[in-house]
């Protein structure tokens, strides 16, 4: 499971279920989020893990 977040056709975040972590692709993303929410990456990583489980369940439903 992989998600890619884009802003104006520029990749800003990447999440891969194999590593189970978010990799930011733009320095300004780190700066903007660290200033406002120090644990931003941890929060969003947990959200992506949840999204992964929902997508897995949805795929199971579609296969039926």
Image (cartoon, rainbow, N blue to C red):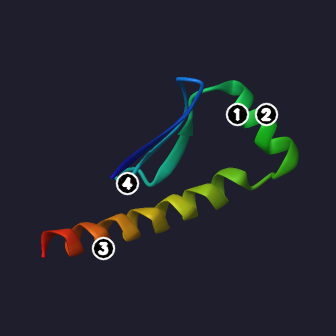
- Circles 1 and 2 in contact, beta carbons < 8 Å: yes
Q: CA distance from mark 2 to mark 4?
A: 24 Å
Residue 31 disc label: 2
- Return the x and y of residue 56 as percentages of the image width and height: 30, 67
Name the residue furthest left.
Answer: 64
Front in this rendered view, residue 31 or 5: 5
Residue labelled with disc 3 = 57
Secondary structure beneath disc 2?
helix
- What residue sits 22% from the left and 75% below the top? 61
- What residue sits 70% from the left and 34% below the top? 29
Residue 17 disc label: 4
Of the image marks 4 and 3, the number of the one nearer the N terminus? 4
- What residue sits 50% from the left and 58% below the top? 48
In the drawing, does residue 24 fall left or right of residue 27?
left
Of the image marks 1 and 4, the number of the one nearer the N terminus? 4
Of the image marks 2 and 3, the number of the one nearer the N terminus? 2
Secondary structure beneath disc 1?
helix
Residue labelled with disc 1 = 29
Q: CA distance from mark 1 to mark 2?
A: 5 Å
- What residue sits 37% from the left and 54% below the top? 17
Of the image marks 1 and 3, the number of the one nearer the N terminus? 1
Quadrant assignment for the C terminus: bottom left
Mark 3 neighbour density, 10 Å: few (under 14) some (14–19) many (20 or more): few
Name which quarter of the figure residue 24 lies in. Answer: top right
Q: CA distance from mark 4 to mark 3?
A: 15 Å
In the drawing, does residue 29 fall left or right of residue 36?
left
Of the image marks 2 and 4, the number of the one nearer the N terminus? 4
């Amino acid at each position: 499971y992989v998600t890619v977040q884009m802003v104006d056709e520029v990749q800003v975040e990447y999440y891969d279920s194999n590593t189970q972590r978010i990799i930011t692709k733009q320095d300004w993303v780190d700066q903007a989020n660290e200033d406002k929410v120090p644990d931003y990456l941890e929060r969003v990583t947990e959200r992506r893990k949840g999204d992964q489980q929902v997508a897995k369940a949805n795929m199971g439903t579609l296969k039926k």
